[in-house]
Amino acid sequence: MIEKAYPVSFEIAGPAAMFTRPDTGSSPVSYPVPTKSALKSIFECVVLSKTAYFEPQRIEICSPVVFHKYSTNYGGPMRKSGTVNFQLFATVLENVCYKAYGVILAYSPPRSGQNPQHQLQEVFIRRLSMGQFHTTPFLGWKEFVPTYFGPVRDTTLADKSINATIPSILSTMYTRPTEGKVAPQFEQDVVIERGVMFYAERVV
């Protein structure tokens, strides 16, 4: 028996984004694309479930990849003990636009009268189309709010001039998509071809 798929997609665009490379330390630099964890966080701004979850499969980069310097006052855990805010310098993306595609997976198969995959898919599509969010959506860092977050638009296309290989990209921060323990995992030599990148399939 072929397992039924529950696909979902969304488009998000904004003036700035930050998908931090963990190897760049106190002056962080962004990946050119969202990580799987970042896409999952964006999805969960619309709806969150403990029995089903969004698994990203493909991203389309719909605007040129442009980096620029950014500074902000930082008051987080990296500051020295006894100090208040300090200025954090970062390299972020500007004028981004992405189309994300994936599927809804669940921890257990549907039972009679209860299908968490279908339910999560249906609620996400309905809320996204109506502009209803659980929390404010953001592009990596919470100050980077989008100018558009909704269904994919026919007028937006992948930038076919973008071709690159990312030597190492963060795949997930946790052992489980929901309520997991911190255990970073990375994918190696991930290819962006003609503006499209595929995320490695993850088995839970």
Image (tube, helix red, strand yellow):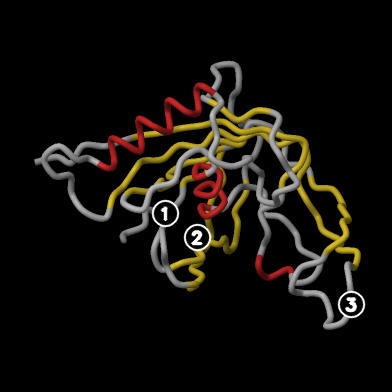
Numbered disc in front, either 1 or 3: 3
Q: Is residue 131 above or below residue 55?
A: above
- Read off the residue under disc 3: 83
Q: Residue furthest top?
A: 155
Q: Is residue 160 toward the left or the right of residue 141 in the image?
A: left
Q: Is residue 51 above or below residue 1?
A: below
Residue situated in front as seen by the camera: 85 or 64: 85
* Dot placed on the residue nearer the N-terminal end, 1 or 3: 3
Mark linked to residue 171? 2
Residue situated in front as seen by the camera: 104 or 31: 104
The reply to whether the C-beta atoms of the residues labelled 2 and 1 are less than 8 Å apart is: yes
Instruction: Please state, as top left, top right, bottom left or bottom right, where the C terminus lies in the image.
Output: bottom left
Mark linked to residue 200? 1
Numbered disc in front, either 2 or 3: 3
| Structural distance between the alpha carbons of marks 1 and 3 | 42 Å
**Amino acid residing under circle 1:** Ala
**Amino acid residing under circle 2:** Ser
- Residue at point 59% right, 42% down? 135
Q: Percent position (x, y) of residue 148?
A: 65, 28
Q: Percent position (x, y) of residue 101?
A: 45, 37
Q: Is residue 24 toward the left or the right of residue 113 in the image?
A: right
Mark linked to residue 153? none
* Dot placed on the residue nearer the N-terminal end, 2 or 3: 3
Q: Percent position (x, y) of residue 185?
A: 48, 68
Identify the image quadrant of residue 82: bottom right
Label 2 crowd bin: few (<14), some (14–19), many (20+), radius 10 Å: some
- Residue at point 54% right, 29% down? 132
| Structural distance between the alpha carbons of marks 2 and 3 | 33 Å
Q: Is residue 153 toward the left or the right of residue 124 in the image?
A: right
Q: Is residue 153 above or below residue 41?
A: above
